[in-house]
């Protein structure tokens, strides 16, 4: 569909705006005369400030005579010779006019000129920069992204003070015309990766874009793979660190979370505190996170397999207690473990979605009353409840893989309960195959863990000291060998 151009008639342009925005109470227009030429100002109150417009533009125009005989000369003078901080490119089509107004800009329409001038007078209500809620780091910068795209870009640029940072702001193919920004370091990021990412983002067509995670499924090659295609952060410092590794950061207007691509498996076990603490302590914490992930995924399934199919592997005293506990429960062990795990997830979801005033109450009731009642009634055994709770707590050690841990846990429980040790091994093979089959933009998802090499001990499984880590920084596309 061809784009409709603006008319040279001021009346026709105002009639068009009144036709599409006239029913909106926040739409404001005012006619005025500049140098004997009829003009009009259009803006949305609430997201654009009339006070800023007066200080920046109208006051300057009233103080200085405008040397123009028609609308075209007036527009040329305002764009090239006046002190008004206007957009360098005039508006010539109706769709651009609507987008500029919706972005909080004020638009000057001039009679006799088939173009308009946009002035940056945005004054949108916004949340102030606060502390991150989902990334519990003790040290490092305590700033978090907000919902305003320009603010997020400024937070990122304040951390990344070089001339190589590129921030490409574009409009997504959505009904709401939401803006997003692709950020990268032009010297560190591989050009082919940026070109591929830019092309994929431009081809995405979705009804609405409320978060950068909406892009994730379009960037995945294997749609059935459960591992995430990207990582997310609400910390500008973390995003800056990823930019220094040659990766790209995607910011979406209205979302306080940034998407980082490509993402590797080992990055889910890293945090800013790893690099603020000593190397020995940071390495120990990172190993504990790997153990917690394995416990959250394989712990319940391993318990079911050992009790049902391999009781000889359990010490006699422990086996006697387990057998005594399971003898009083009516359900098979696999169904019992599935039921308890499902119940814990229901309690977690209820506590998360409930209003804050009763959220803690829901968690307390679910954890104490329901658990104690189920054990007292003989519906579930204490060992099963303990193992399921331990797996749930272990999942919280790696929150960015929470969804994957839950799904993998259910798969492993079913396979281990149905087929025993072969089922448990089959579940591990399925998970490993998914991880090996993930290639974000052509890079190995398991790098630097597989193949195991120097990079795994430098900043993978553990972290080396800063004096060695600073000698050769990791950059995407240069250190995979």
Image: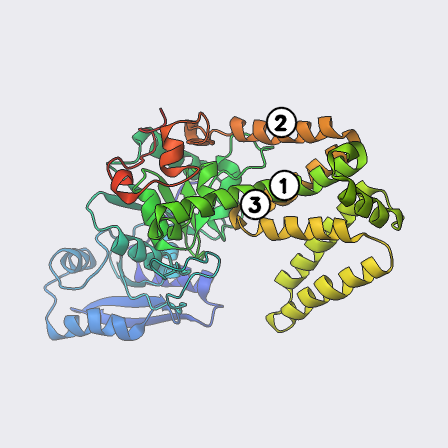
* Mark found first going from the N terminus, 1 or 2: 1
Which mark identifies residue 297?
A: 1
36 on left or right of 248: left
From mark 2 to mark 3, how far is it between C-alphas? 19 Å
Query: In the rendered view, would you say 317 is above or below 71?
Result: above
Residue 425 location, x and y as percent? Answer: 67, 28
Q: Residues within 10 Å of mark 2 (few under 14, many from 20)?
A: few
Colouring method of the image: rainbow
55 on left or right of 405: left
Query: In the rendered view, would you say 349 is above or below 330?
Result: below
Q: Are marks 2 and 3 in contact (CB under 8 Å)?
A: no
Identify the residue at image location x=29%, y=57%: 154
* Mark found first going from the N terminus, 3 or 1: 3
Identify the residue at image location x=28%, y=44%: 466
Q: Residues within 10 Å of mark 1 (few under 14, many from 20)?
A: many
Please give the residue where the numbered disc 3 appears in the rendered image.
292
Quarter of the picture holding the N terminus = top left
The secondary structure type at the circle numbered 3 is helix
* Mark found first going from the N terminus, 2 or 3: 3
Between tags 2 and 3, which lies in front?
3
The secondary structure type at the circle numbered 1 is helix
Q: Which sits in the foreground, 246 or 176? A: 246
Between tags 3 and 1, which lies in front?
3
Quarter of image, res 183 = top left
Residue 364 location, x and y as percent? Answer: 68, 67
Residue 182 seen in render: no
């Amino acid at each position: 569909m061809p784009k409709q151009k603006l008319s040279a008639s001021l009346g026709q342009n105002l009639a068009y705006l009144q036709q599409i925005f006239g029913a909106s109470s926040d739409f404001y227009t005012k006619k005025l005369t500049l140098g004997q030429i009829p003009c009009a100002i259009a803006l949305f109150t609430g997201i654009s400030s009339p006070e800023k417009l007066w200080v920046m533009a109208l006051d300057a125009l009233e103080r200085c005579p405008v040397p123009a005989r028609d609308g075209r000369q007036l527009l040329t003078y305002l764009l090239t010779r006046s002190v008004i901080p206007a957009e360098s490119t005039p508006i010539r089509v109706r769709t651009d006019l609507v987008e500029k107004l919706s972005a909080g800009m004020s638009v000057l329409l001039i009679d006799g000129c088939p173009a308009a001038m946009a002035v940056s007078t945005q004054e949108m209500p916004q949340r102030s920069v606060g502390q991150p809620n989902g990334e519990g780091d003790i040290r490092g910068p305590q700033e978090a992204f907000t919902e305003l795209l320009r603010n997020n870009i400024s937070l990122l640029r304040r951390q990344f003070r070089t001339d190589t940072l590129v921030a490409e702001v574009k409009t997504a193919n959505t009904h709401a015309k939401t803006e997003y920004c692709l950020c990268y370091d032009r010297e560190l990021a591989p050009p082919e990766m940026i070109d591929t990412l830019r092309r994929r983002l431009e081809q995405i067509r979705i009804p609405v874009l409320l978060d950068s995670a909406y892009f994730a499924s379009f960037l995945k090659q294997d749609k059935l793979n459960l591992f995430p295609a990207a990582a997310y952060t609400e910390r500008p410092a973390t995003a800056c660190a990823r930019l220094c590794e040659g990766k790209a950061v995607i910011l979406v207007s209205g979302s306080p979370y940034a998407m980082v691509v490509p993402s590797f498996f080992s990055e889910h076990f890293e945090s800013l505190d790893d690099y603020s603490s000593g190397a020995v302590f940071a390495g120990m914490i990172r190993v504990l996170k790997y153990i917690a992930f394995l416990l959250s995924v394989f712990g319940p399934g391993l318990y079911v397999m050992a009790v049902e199919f391999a009781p000889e592997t359990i010490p006699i005293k422990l086996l006697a207690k387990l057998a005594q506990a399971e003898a009083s429960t009516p359900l098979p062990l696999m169904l019992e473990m599935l039921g308890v795990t499902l119940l814990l997830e229901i309690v977690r979801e209820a506590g998360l979605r409930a209003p804050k005033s009763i959220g803690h109450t829901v968690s307390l009731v679910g954890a104490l009353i329901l658990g104690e009642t189920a054990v007292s009634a003989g519906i579930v055994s204490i060992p099963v409840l303990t193992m399921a709770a331990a797996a749930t707590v272990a999942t919280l050690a790696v929150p960015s893989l929470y969804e994957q841990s839950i799904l993998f846990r259910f798969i492993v429980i079913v396979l281990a309960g149905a087929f025993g040790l072969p089922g448990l091994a089959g579940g591990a093979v399925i998970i490993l195959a998914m991880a090996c089959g993930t290639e974000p933009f052509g890079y190995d998802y398991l790098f630097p863990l597989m193949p195991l090499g120097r990079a795994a001990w430098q900043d993978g499984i553990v972290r080396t000291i800063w004096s060695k880590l600073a000698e050769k920084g990791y950059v995407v596309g240069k250190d995979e060998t």
